Every structure is written in structure tokens, then in C-alpha cells.
Amino acid sequence: MFSITLKLMKKSARMLIPAGIAILIGTAFIAATFLFGNAMNDALAAQNTAQLGGANYVISPDSGKDLTDKDQDYIYTRTVNDFQLDRIRATEGVKDARASYAGSVTVTRGNKHASSYVITTAAKRTLLPVTITQGDQPADSNEIALTKSVADQLGVKVGDRVTVNSQAAQYAGKTGDSAGNTGDAGDESAQNADGTSSHDGDSDAASGASVSSDGANTADSGMTVRVVGLTDDSNGAYAYYGGASVLSDNVITAMAGSNDFGNLPVYLVYLDIDDASDTAAASTVKQVSTLLPKHFSVQSRAALVEESVKSMSSGETSITTIFLLSFGILAMLVAALVIANTFQVLVAQRRRTLALLRTIGANKSQLYVSVLFEAGVLGLIASALGVGLGIGLMAALCQSGLMKATGMTMRLVLSGPVFTVPMAFGIIMTVIASLGSARSATAVTPLEALRPIELTDTRRAGVVRAVISVLLIVAGVALCAFSVWQMSENIAGRDSMADKQYPLVLLAAIIGCALIFLGLVLSATFWLPVLMRGVGAMVALAGPSAKVAHANIQKNPRRVAATGAALLIGVTLVSTIATGAASAKQTMNEALTTRYSVDMIAAGTDMTGKQASEAAKVKGVQSSIYAPTRMMTMKDADGKSLSVLVVGVDGVDALRKVVRSDLSGVTIDGDSVLMPKYSAATGKDIPLDKSVTFTAGAAEAQADATNGPSGNDANGSAENGNGQSGGTQTLTLKPRKVDYRRIASNYAAVAFVDASHFTNGGIKADGHIMLMRIDAEGAGVALNDVFTNVQNVFSASAGVTVTGPVAERTQWETMINGMMALLVGLIAVAVLIALVGVANTLSLSVIERTRESATLRAIGMTRGQLRRSLAVEALLLSLVSGVVGVILGTLFGWLGSYMVFSLYGDTVFPFEWATNGVVLGVAALAALLASVAPARRAVKTPPVEALAEA
């Protein structure tokens, strides 16, 4: 019987192709998901250990032990000197050792600035976690190997000189501590990588501040160093920072605000140990261990990689794999509906053959096993091809380098589950999907070999299914209604479960939607044929082809329901995600608009008026203000201190151009200050007395004293406890409160004063701010383009940041669009498989209607009319299911948006015309393409021959 089955398969190979494609797509997706998880684990493990560079051992804090807070404090306060690097390097078997210290610096050349992450150097470049692509690694004093991106940004090449600076170095220089001690800086010694000391009489290598030719301290201007090489972060060790530059020991010491490399805090030391002999390597590790501080040990690179993979296998990569795998399983469930229809086609096509087999002695069990065996063989072949396709797609993705944009280099990593899980799932799902057809095969009697083929399934859907479907829908609606009620109560400020048990309320809504959807899919046998009959009745008015299609689609409601349900699943999910994403963007846009009174803000200490003028000309910037600022402190009526950014403006009229708030009846003069009603930090009302006093903080006052004589405050010059001018600035004004929100979110409040306070010396500006009103739509440009162009204007100033609701909205929309594209792409696999099912249903219809089609041809229906009738049938199947899916998905998307985004503001309930239109258009086009092959089959056979076969 098995040989007969294989011969039947070979004869029906064309009919098996659609089901095989469905299985292939589903299994390829599952295989690719496992491969993606493997590649992610491998890439993240490599990334987590990339900072080791060429090190094969690392000195690190002990893990897995019960350490007290005191022990933890001890571990994280160790310095380079505690590790005795000179003795470790002198140990037999140790090729090199590198203490790990890193930070951020600003690199300047001319009027160009760039930020760079910096790390310590090593004697051998193999121990560095970055690759030296040009030149060499820093070895002597005052050297740097820049990242290629920073070098390109600054227009620097090997041999040029640049200036590096950091906040720690600036602070040390201003306060006179550590790096700022310049009295005898030229006589300070800096510890080199080899543990020796060097003396540089021409530079303050230990001080962290540059010394001009006349000996003056120029701490603020940074330290001049020579570029000796360019680096590339090929392993993604510092992908988050865009790579890392390498500094010589004396420079990184200065940038840390210290005067001795040995005093830098470290808790990781990377080692290159000769491991040609396991015994010798173990002996070296043992000797090094005796030199270490307590709670530190030497661990091999292999052990670190193993720990990294183990920690990730139960972390974010497993979550990613499970998330993607759920879509693979969804694709296979949709494929099961397609497979079921395919085997109905096969059994229908072979009904006379099966009857003849019964006539010559085959029993029911043999026919049953034959169908299941055929399903198993099909599942095996298609699943194997699917696994091969999945491997090929993943290999292509790894080779394409597309993932490098995320900072990860992925490679193909094969494992057992890549082969076993997809193939097992594909075979099992195929066999399960064929069970109904196998039962149909056993119902064939020997007498049917002599009867005309009459295959229309007239069975009615079961009562049990109807009852279960209704119960599921009722339970789902009840859960959704309960969730909405609880959320509305919470929003209204009344007692609600959503206040303290929000996850449970959200879970109830999710379960409710799932129950409604499951109930509708189960009951599709009842309502979907009725819906198609109603739509078909209207379509039938279009002509004879449409009328025939309307009649044909009613003949097998069970099969129509199965095909429609497959398509319904995919379209509903796409519409749900598109609606949720659109609601998220619009709701958050509204929330951001109400939380900010200024569209976009640029602020920084090194902003220039020229830059502000260029930014004001950016297309989409409707109006702007460029104003001086000073960070000051004040006390409210309750005596609480607030950090306030004081901004000088030329009257309230200028402010009205950029601030979205009611400023009617408000004035700003020399005696008044405009204050916000609510604190940006707490959201609570700011209580104010009849007058408020703003004071520059101690650090700012000290900085002013360093830079020169301070300006006087409104009441005259301030004095310290010794009666000497300390540079402290105060300003007492009458407050006027207006409800404007979050001008600059880094401060509890932003206060607006008359610009004359800055020009007459009352307040000394320590920065500038530019407030902008944006009208991207009116200018005909994208919001993201406006934000990017303004950022580009200020790119030369390292200290300027561009923020505001436009920035947050841009980032939010980018994230939402990326997630939506990913999810829609995944679900598109299920939609594709469902459309294969449409072709299967039409194929079965053609087989069933062999005599009918021949009769229609005999009485005058043309080939074109017959083709059009099948095309209309395909359109009815896809569009009716698609429209129902769009409506259902939109409702689910609205419910989900209300449950999630009502916490942030008034929820917007959009209808995604564009996305839903595209989905329906694709479904219609694919349905028309799916009707081509069945239509060719229908018109291929001459009427007389078809009547004879029937």
C-alpha cells in the first residue's frame, strides 16, 4: 500500500506543491528563529568578552560568593597600584598585562569638537580590545590613537595634534586638586605602562592642564596630544560609544583628574599568558594569584565565555527567541488550515481511485494509514527544504552585514534544535491537519467507483462548536468590558483595580481579546459563509461571471470558512499592530504637547550666536529666541531649594513667539521674573513669596573667581565670610506665575527675566539657550528632518544638546515604526501562507465543478468568463475575510491603546487607512494571482472530454 501511496504522490505532485510551500515557509521561519537566537547569543557573548581583546585570562572580582557591603566597597576602590602590575609583567609566562580604565573626553581640533570614549593602552597591540588600523598604539607620553570616525569628523590624520579635555580634568584644574596642581607640575612623575616613571619638563603631563609658552595655566583649554594611530572597534567592544580611542598612561591619568596613573581606580586587569602548555599556564596563573588583592582571582577567557552564554540563555536572547518563535508557530497553525484544504483536494481528486482500491480489497484502515503516510512524507520533505531555506536566509543575513548597524557582527551557528524542532513540528502539524481528510477517505465505498464525482460537503457545523464559540465570545466581551470599566474608574480618580493591580486588569483585556478572536475563528463556519453570501448577492448583479462565482462560493461553507479563517488570523494581527502603533504615536504626541510649552530647545555652554542664526533658518523652524542663561538656586515659600535656569529675554512679546502658553496680561521688566506654576521635577505647584532671591551656586561662584572678577548682583557685589568678594551672585525679583511646562527638563524650573540683568553685569551668563517653535507640516518637511538639521547646525559644539518634545516625538516614532515594521513583517508570513490556501480552495472548487464547468462551456460560457468567475470567487474569499480582519483588528487595537496609553493622556483612536488599505490591496492582488492556475485548469479541458470524465 505504501508503494501505491508514493505513486499517487508522484502523480499528484502539482497538487502537493501549495501545501508543501505552506509547510516550507513555516518551518523555514522556525529554523531561522532558532538560528537568529543562536547568532544573537554568539554575538552578545563575543561582545561581552570583546573588551578582553587578545587577553586569554582576566583578573576580576570573585563571583558567586557571599560578599558583604564592606567587601564590595573594598573591591570597587582598588587602584592600579594594588595589582602590582610591574611584578605581574615580570612573572614567568606573562606576556603582557593591561589595567582596564575608561572614560569620556572631548577631542578638539581648531573649531571642531567630537566626543570619544577612551581606554588605557598596552605594551602589545594584541591586548587592546580595539584594532589599530593605521599607525601604532600610544607608547610614550602625550599620545592618542583616535577612532576612525572621530578622526574623520575632525579631519585628523596620523601625526597631527589634537586637544583632549574632560570634565574631571576641568574640575581638577579649577579647584587646584590633583590634576589642577600646577605649581611644580613639570617636576611630577607619571607612571608608564611598564611601571617605570618618566619625566617631561616641557608639559604638565601629570597636571591634566596645558601650559602655554609663557607658563600660564590653561586648564580650560585641555591637553595637546599627538595622534599616533587610528582604531576600529571591529568586535563591537564599545559599540554603544561608537568605538574607543586609546590614550597613553599620562594622558588618561590627566583626563581622570589625577596626577598618578597608579591611583586610577580599576577592578579588571587583562592578561596575555603563554598557554602553549596547560601545566605552565596553570603555574603562571597560580603565581599571579599570589600578587592580587583579596576578593580577586584569575579567570580564563573560555570560562568567561561559558558564563556569558549561560547567563544569556535565560535572559534577553531567550525572550527574543520565544517572541519570534510564537510567530513561527502562528505561521504553522495557519499552514495547518492550508494543509487540511490541500488534502481535501487530494482526497476529492482521488475519490474514484480510492473507491477502486476498495473494490480490489483495500480496507478502511489501509486507506486511513495511506493518507497519513502521504502527509508524513510531504511534511518530511517540505520541512527539510524549509530548514535548508532557513539556514540559507540566516547565512545571507550574516554575510550581508546588515546587523553591523546594531553594533553586532553575527555569524551562522548551527545547533540540534535548528534541525529537530522545525522538522518535528512540520511533520506533526501536517499529519494532524490531514486527519479529517483521512477520515473522509475511509468513507469512500466501492460503489463510488461507478458513480459520478459529487464532492460537495453538505454537512452542517456542529451544535457543540456553536455553543463553545458563543461562550468564548461572551466571556471575552465580559473581560474586555470589565477592563475598560476599571480603567475609566482609575482615570476618573475613583477606586479601581487598575490603580494597584494594573497588570491583572491589562491581562484580563488581553485574555478577553484572545477569547473573542478564538470564538470568532471557531464559529467562522456559521457566520463567514453567510457574510460572503450577502456580499456575493450584491456582486452577482455585476454579470454572469459574478453570478456563477456567487453560486459556487456557497457550495462548501466549511471549506470557505477554513480558508477565510486562515486569512482572518493574519489580517487581524496586522491591523491590530498598525492601529496600536498609530494610536501610540498620536497619543504620545498629544501627551508631549501638553507636557512641553516649547517645541524644541538647544542649550549649552559653547553655543554661539552664529549657530543660533543658522538654526533659525532651518526649514520647519517657524520662530526662535536666542538667550543667555545662568543656573542658579532659589528657595520657595516652604524653604525648599530649587535648581532654576534663569533665562534673559527681551520682553514677553518675544517669548510669545515660541512658548505655547497663555501669556496674555503678563509683562517682564527689570523688577519681575516669570516663573512656572508647576515644578518640572515633581509636577507640584511651586509656592512663592512676594519676592524670590536667586543665587549662583558655590561651584559656579568659584569658577567665576578663577576666570576673573565676578559681576555684581542686583543689590551690589557679594562678599564672603572674610569680607572679600567671592564672586557669589544674587538677584531678588518679584515673581509672576504662569502655567508653562518643561522648558528644560534638567531643571526644576526655568525662569525668564529681563535680558538687561545679563548685559549690566547683574548675572554672568554661563551658557545660552535657543527656544524654537516648529511647523514642519506647514514647511512641507518631515519632523525628523527638522530635528536632524538643527542637530547638524550645533554639531561643532560638543556641549550643546537639542531636546524637547520634537526630539522625544522623533525618537518615539522611530522606535514605534521600527517595531511595527518588524511585527508586520513577521505576520506577513502568516498572510502569505493563508493566500496559498486561497489557491488551494479554488483548486478544489475546480475539481468539484468539472461537470458544471463543462456544462457552462457547452452552453456558451467563454473561457474568459470562466476565468473571471474564479477571479471573483478569489476576491470574495480574500476581501470579505480581509475586511472582517481589519474591523476586528482595529477594535482590538483601540482597546489595547486605551488600556496602555490612557495612563499618559487622552487616548487617540485612529483608523489606519493607509496600512489597512495596503493589506486589503495585497490580499486582493494575491487572490487574483492565486486564481490563475485553477482557472487555467478549468479552461484547459474541452467540454466534451470534461463531461466524459465526470
Image: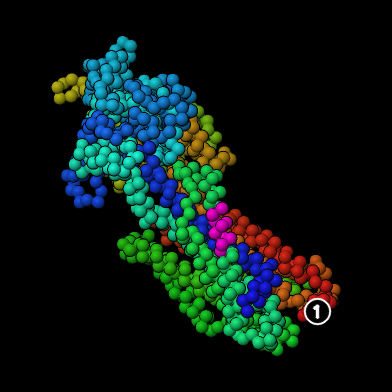
> Tag 1's secondary structure?
helix
Asked whether the viewer can see residue 54, the reply is: yes
Residues in magenta?
383-392
The vertical placement of 436 against 867, above or below, is below
Q: Tell me where residue 646 appears, x and y as whole percent.
A: 33, 32
Q: Residues within 10 Å of mark 1 (few under 14, many from 20)?
A: some
* For residue 619, side relative to residue 902 (left or right): right
Q: Tell me where residue 866 appears, x and y as whole percent.
A: 78, 70
* For residue 729, side relative to residue 221 (left or right): left
* Quadrant including the N terminus: bottom right
Q: Tell me where residue 940 appears, x and y as whole percent.
A: 79, 69
Q: Give the residue drawn at x 25%, y 40%.
A: 283
Identified by mark 1, the residue type is Leu
The vertical placement of 806 against 339, above or below, is above
User: Which residue is label 1 attached to?
Assistant: 947
* Quadrant including the C terminus: bottom right
What secondary structure prevails in the magenta region?
Answer: helix
Q: Give the residue drawn at x 52%, y 80%.
A: 465
Asked whether the viewer can see residue 207, the reply is: no
Q: Residue furthest bottom?
A: 447
Q: Quadrant of residue 943?
A: bottom right
Magenta stretch contains residue 386: yes
Magenta stretch contains residue 212: no
Q: Residue furthest top?
A: 214
Q: Give the residue drawn at x 35%, y 46%.
A: 302
Q: Quadrant of residue 294?
A: top left
Toward the viewer: 730 or 938? 938
Q: Give the residue drawn at x 50%, y 81%.
A: 467
The vertical placement of 856 against 104, above or below, is below
Q: Tell me where residue 672 appears, x and y as whole percent.
A: 32, 32
Q: Quadrant of residue 172?
A: top left
